[in-house]
Amino acid sequence: MNPSEEPSVLNRPPLRPTRAVKLDKIDQRILSDLQHDGRMTNVDLAKRAGISAPPCLRRVRNLEEAGLILSYHAHVNQAALGYPVTVFTTIKLNSVGEGELRRFEGQLEQWPLVREAYVMTGENDFLLKIVARDWDDYQDFLTNYLLESPNVASVKSSLSVKTSKFKAGVPILDE
């Protein structure tokens, strides 16, 4: 496995539902609780959902199989792990044909400092979230990798001063 790939705990490619799935209140509670604490035991999850453990586990597995739970993650302290710098970078490509987009996305997978990447509409083609050990580390990545990419036309960087809000997932129930 490529070290830059995030392994799925569920050991299958994530499914992406194309339309909203109808969930009852118990499924919503389970998703909300797991989104808040992915390490919650099935017994605790079942208690909070108001059901017994076996049907709770079946519901969790059904939510995984339906592609609503894609994986489980730890939210780590990036600064304590040596990456205190976060830079948001917009990329404009010279060409945005399907092949060129795939090639650039393939490059992104090879760059571990790029933690998130979004294809955008409008003036820019990509928005990247990049972490770095310091400003020089980012500058090295920018000049030796990003700007060396053959299809990159322009790059604009914005240094994050601090994270004002971080909330993983999506609103479920009355969050």
Image (cartoon, helix red, strand yellow):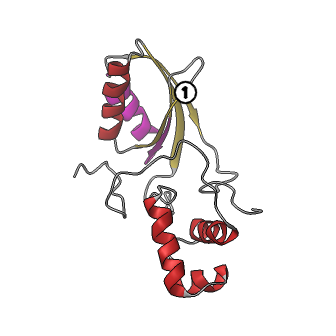
Vertical arrangement, residue 15 with respect to residue 98, above or below: below
Q: Is residue 164 left or right of residue 38?
A: right
Q: Can residue 94 be seen in this view?
A: yes
In the current view of this chain or complex, which residue is farthest to the left? 1
For image coordinates 48% across by 66% down, the residue present is 62
User: Residue 172 sits in which quadrant?
Assistant: bottom right
In percent of width and height, residue 38 lies at: 52, 71
In the current view of this chain or complex, which residue is farthest to the right? 174
Which residues make up the magenta segment? Answer: 128-148
Camera-nearest residue between 163 and 17: 17
Per the image, label 1 sits on a secondary structure element best described as loop
Vertical arrangement, residue 166 with respect to residue 53, above or below: above
User: Residue 49 sits in which quadrant?
Assistant: bottom right
Decide whether residue 61 is among the magenta residues: no
Tell me the amino acid under the disc marked 1: Met
For image coordinates 60% across by 42% down, the residue present is 160
Vertical arrangement, residue 29 with respect to residue 159, above or below: below
For image coordinates 41% across by 12% down, the residue present is 94
Camera-nearest residue between 145 and 12: 12
Q: Can residue 40 be seen in this view?
A: no
Residue carrying label 1: 120
Q: Count residues near mark 1 (Cα–Cα under 10 Å), then give few for <14, some for 14-19, many for 20+.
A: few
Decide whether residue 133 is among the magenta residues: yes
Camera-nearest residue between 103 and 87: 103
In percent of width and height, residue 112 lies at: 35, 45
Screen quadrant of the C terminus: bottom right
In percent of width and height, residue 70 lies at: 45, 57
Q: Is residue 98 left or right of residue 117?
A: left
Q: Is residue 134 left or right of residue 88?
A: left
In percent of width and height, residue 169 lies at: 60, 55
Vertical arrangement, residue 130 with respect to residue 13, above or below: above
Q: In this view, does 84 lie to the left or right of 107?
A: right
